[in-house]
Image (spheres, coloured by chain):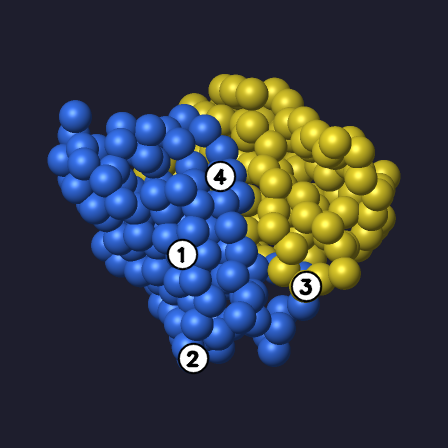
Chain colours: A yellow, B blue
Amino acid sequence: SQTIHQWPATLVQPVGSPLSLECTVEGTSNPNLYWYRQAAGRGLQLLFYSVGIGQISSEVPQNLSASRPQDRQFILSSKKLLLSDSGFYLCAWSLSAGFGYEQYFGPGTRLTVT
Amino acid sequence: GQQVMQIPQYQHVQEGEDFTTYCNSSTTLSNIQWYKQRPGGHPVFLIQLVKSGEVKKQKRLTFQFGEAKKNSSLHITATQTTDVGTYFCAGLDLKTSYDKVIFGPGTSLSVIP
């Protein structure tokens, strides 16, 4: 069966510090991968998605970046965090082929920028 | 671009009452998905509807996809405290995107015991 891992679960970082969040998927090959951010009590904002190694699509301009160095690994990074980067970061995967297959979310990382 | 809206934003019900949330898209959808997020948790996939006018049931939950494939609804009969959470719809419009769905803002359900 497929499993999605995210770490860390919680993170408190000062403004201006770098960020690296990692997501890995087990039990499937060539998944579509997604990074979402959710502000407290709000909806899901799609940040990045990837349909293959090295292929990243950015949805909103921001100081975040994403990389997919391996088939089942998705990394969210920032060189300098802003207060507005605080939120709940969720990684998700879906089957590829692009026909809107359901998404499976990881447990998320709660980031607080102080 | 494509927009997906949901109403209401919040709903408080007494346990045992029914609950309905509505999802509307600005464009015709190829399919619609529903997710549930418990407080403090992550979204969990519930169901996907593909056909015009489709109705699917999961125990006390009934999902409908509109005839024009631009709206959908989720109805919960006789709510229980385990139904508490935020319900998101997510639509795929193949004319604008082949790889991602657009999530609605969600409806947060509170159930008063």
At label 2, the amino acid type is Ala
Q: CA distance from mark 1 to mark 3?
A: 20 Å
| In this rendering, the label closer to the viewer, 4 or 1 | 1
On screen, residue B59 versus residue B101, left or right, reads left
Q: Write down the quadrant of residue A104 in the picture.
A: top right
Marks 4 & 3 on one chain = no
Q: Label 4: which residue?
A: B43
Taking the spot 26% from the left edge, 32% from the top edge, the residue there is B80
| In this rendering, the label closer to the viewer, 1 or 3 | 1
Q: Which mark is residue A99?
A: 3
Badge 1 local density, few (<14 within 10 Å), some, or many (20+)? many
Residue A43 image offset from top left, x and y in percent: 40, 47
Labels 2 and 3 touching (C-beta < 8 A): no
Q: CA distance from mark 4 to mark 3?
A: 20 Å
| In this rendering, the label closer to the viewer, 4 or 2 | 2
Q: Label 2: which residue?
A: B68
Taking the spot 52% from the left edge, 20% from the top edge, the residue there is A10
SS under mark 1 = strand
Q: Label 1: which residue?
A: B63
Residue B76 image offset from top left, x and y in percent: 30, 46
| In this rendering, the label closer to the viewer, 2 or 3 | 2
SS under mark 3 = loop
